[in-house]
Image (cartoon, rainbow, N blue to C red):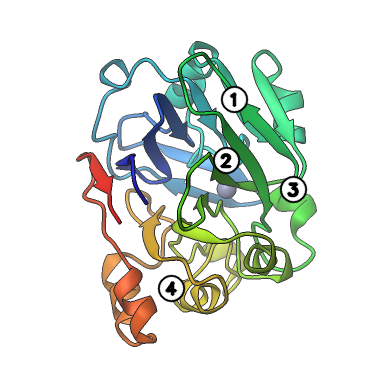
Amino acid sequence: MKGVRVTHIGGPTILIEVGGWRLLTDPTFDPPGRKYDFGWGTGSKKLTGPAIAIRDLAPIDAVLLTHDHHDDNLDPAGRALLPSARVVVTTVAGANRLAGNARGLEPWATTRLEAPNRLPIDVVATPCRHGPPLTRPLAGAVIGFALRWPAQEHGVLWVSGDTVLYRGVRKVATRLKVDTALLHLGGVQFPVTGPLRYTMTAREAVKLCEIVRPRTVIPIHYEGWSHFRQGRKAIERRFANAAEDIRRSIRWVPIGLGVELEG
Ligand SMILES: [Zn+2]
């Protein structure tokens, strides 16, 4: 994917620079050490702070917020920066809660980012289910984002969002051609809910790649918090045993360093 620079700031927080835009996913900028309550007896401790401070990232044109109601995707410092962005694209429920500059999208709805002298970018919301079947009322609405702009050669840039592998996210394979996928991994589990998972495991990620076939896969949302059950090693191990094109598709973006996507 040409003309895109990606900087992993930590957890789910990524700066995407493309066509003159500075887009930020799920802002998390709190210092480490605090415990957060996610509701229903679940929670997590933040283990690392952001690799880059907010003041060094400004200006942010748009925030792509997969969901607003869990602190590991929007912590208090991240929430405080939302008004400074031109627009916050998120779920319909989230946009109602945030109000102000928030724009809500149902799954498969699209909004366009436009400004003089910049590439227009279509942001397509993709479906997520943030837990096992029937947990949507507890886990709340979540979306992913497919970014489309003119002259993309090999498909969209896709941010999966916090989701398990299920029918909705599999539909991405039939509706979109994906060049680069930023996948929220971590295989999230909580002691109170036993074996239930709230985000993809590495095994599920490989299965998803078998149907979506992105040219490049960038793992995100796998470090920095105590509720992640699978870190880089577990992800590497699973991808090492995948089909050759999938094995080769994985790309680790170092935390805090901007990386140009190529090819
Ligand atoms: Zn969440």
Question: Which of the two discs, 3 and 4, labels the residue nearer the N terminus?
Answer: 3
User: Height in image: 73 above or below 231?
Assistant: above
Q: Are the two marked residues, 4 and 1, in contact with CB atoms closer than 8 angstroms?
A: no
Q: Residue 21, percent across and down?
A: 43, 25
Label 1 belongs to which residue? 88
Residue drawn at point x = 61 percent, y = 52 percent: 41
Query: Local crowd at mark 3 within 10 Å, few (<14), some, or many (≥20)?
Result: some
The image quadrant where one finds the C terminus is bottom left
**Residue closer to the observer: 259 or 116:** 116
Which residue type does callout 2 highlight?
His
Question: Which of the two discs, 4 and 1, labels the residue nearer the N terminus?
Answer: 1
Cα gap from disc 2 to disc 3, whole angstroms: 19 Å
Query: Local crowd at mark 4 within 10 Å, few (<14), some, or many (≥20)?
Result: many
User: Position of 254 compared to 76: left or right?
Assistant: left
Which residue type does callout 1 highlight?
Val
Q: Are the two marked residues, 2 and 1, in contact with CB atoms closer than 8 angstroms?
A: no
Label 3 belongs to which residue? 107
Cα gap from disc 1 to disc 3, whole angstroms: 16 Å
Q: Nearer the viewer, mark 2 or mark 1?
A: 1
Cα gap from disc 2 to disc 4, whole angstroms: 22 Å
Say the numbered circle drawn on residue 70: 2
User: Position of 25 compared to 198: left or right?
Assistant: left
Question: Which of the two discs, 2 and 1, labels the residue nearer the N terminus?
Answer: 2
